[in-house]
Image (cartoon, grey):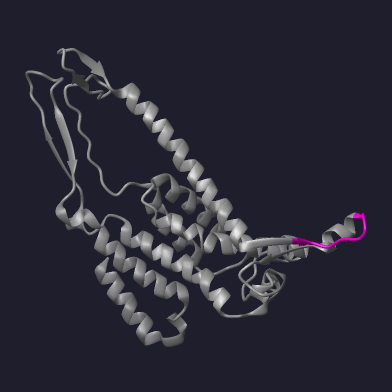
């Protein structure tokens, strides 16, 4: 992979503007980090020891070498940088189409390579298109922090939302392999970085037996399952609260209507960013 990254770097350096697009730089960054995190000398090693006399007393340790402590953190940080900067640069540009959430009202008709669905999406109501821009800001800025969260369930939620955004971009436009590469960067969010499996003195399900002061044994898996359910509820609730707080902090709906018909309703409702003066 290192060799391919070096060759592609020389290709981008020689080709100039032909290979200076955002997806070319992203491919170089992804290739370098992938080679760093998943090089052959950094692969996981499986050490196992078993006794032929007693099959119940066996230990299987899935240990990683000291170099694998990087895990998938660099790739997730790259994805965070890509999405967060994509959202922030739109706000810092001071472009009225982004601050007024009207960018999609022109985007589908002015992009370089539209897809067959671009014309149909362009015909949608302006409120729906502005709401799409607002959702894009939510996914690119606050949701990006979920990608680097230490909680796996949060990372999965963030990855799914990023994948949804990229899929919508793919069906409404053509940006080479940029969106596909972004989806691939979301895959490390679904796995854990460190693995350590130990099965010792238990049954076929790997349930440990703990000995108390009386010398009696008891199974601890019920307590573990109950505490795991409580933790899952807390994590999911905190994630939902974070997303709702992000929407409340960034998006504001305005409604000024003096008529009661449906057309007046759609003309009176508007959505805007709270962080702008528009």
Lateral position of residue 14 relative to residue 136, left or right:
left
| Near-viewer residue (253 or 86) | 253
Provide residue 136's location: percent of width, then percent of height. Answer: 59, 62
Provide residue 110's location: percent of width, then percent of height. Answer: 68, 76
| Near-viewer residue (110 or 4) | 110
| Near-viewer residue (186 or 100) | 100
| Near-viewer residue (189 or 123) | 189
Task: Say which quadrant the C terminus sits in.
Answer: bottom right
Residue 258 on the magenta segment: yes
Residue 224 on the magenta segment: no
Count of marks, rendered view: 0
The prevailing secondary structure element of the residues shown in magenta is loop
Q: Residue 168: in sight, yes or no?
A: no
| Residue found at the very far front of the displayed protein | 213
Q: Residue 228: in sight, yes or no?
A: yes
| Residue drawn at (29%, 49%) of the image | 193
The answer to which image quadrant residue 251 occupies is: bottom right
Provide residue 28's location: percent of width, then percent of height. Answer: 35, 72
| Residue drawn at (13%, 22%) of the image | 57
Lateral position of residue 261 relative to residue 149, left or right:
right
| Residue drawn at (42%, 74%) of the image | 24
Span shown in magenta? 254-261
Provide residue 245's location: percent of width, then percent of height. Answer: 56, 54
Lateral position of residue 72 relative to residue 209, left or right:
right
Task: Say which quadrant the N terminus sits in.
Answer: bottom left
Image: 181 above or below 109 = above
Image: 14 above or below 277 = below
């Amino acid at each position: 992979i290192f060799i391919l990254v070096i060759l592609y770097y020389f290709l981008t350096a020689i080709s100039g503007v032909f290979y200076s697009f955002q997806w070319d730089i992203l491919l170089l960054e992804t290739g370098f980090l992938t080679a760093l995190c998943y090089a052959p000398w950094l692969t996981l090693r499986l050490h196992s020891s078993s006794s032929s006399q007693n099959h119940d007393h066996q230990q299987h340790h899935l240990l990683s070498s000291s170099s694998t402590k990087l895990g998938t953190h660099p790739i997730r940080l790259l994805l965070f940088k890509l999405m967060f900067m994509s959202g922030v640069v739109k706000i810092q540009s001071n472009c009225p189409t982004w601050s007024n959430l009207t960018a999609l009202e022109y985007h589908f008709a002015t992009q370089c390579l539209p897809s067959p669905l671009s014309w149909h999406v362009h015909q949608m109501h302006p409120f729906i298109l502005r709401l799409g821009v607002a959702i894009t800001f939510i996914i690119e800025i606050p949701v990006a922090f979920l990608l680097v969260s230490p909680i796996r369930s949060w990372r999965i939620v963030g990855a799914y939302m990023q994948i949804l955004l990229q899929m919508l971009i793919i069906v409404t436009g053509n940006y080479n392999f940029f969106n596909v590469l972004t989806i691939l960067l979301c895959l490390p969010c679904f796995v854990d970085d460190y693995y350590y499996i130990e099965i010792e003195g238990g049954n076929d399900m790997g349930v440990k037996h703990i000995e108390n002061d009386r010398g009696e044994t008891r199974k601890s898996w019920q307590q573990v399952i109950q505490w795991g359910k409580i933790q899952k509820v807390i994590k999911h609730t905190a994630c939902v609260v974070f997303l709702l707080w992000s929407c409340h902090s960034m998006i504001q709906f305005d409604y000024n209507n003096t008529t009661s018909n449906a057309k007046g309703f759609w003309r009176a409702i508007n959505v805007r960013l709270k962080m702008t003066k528009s």
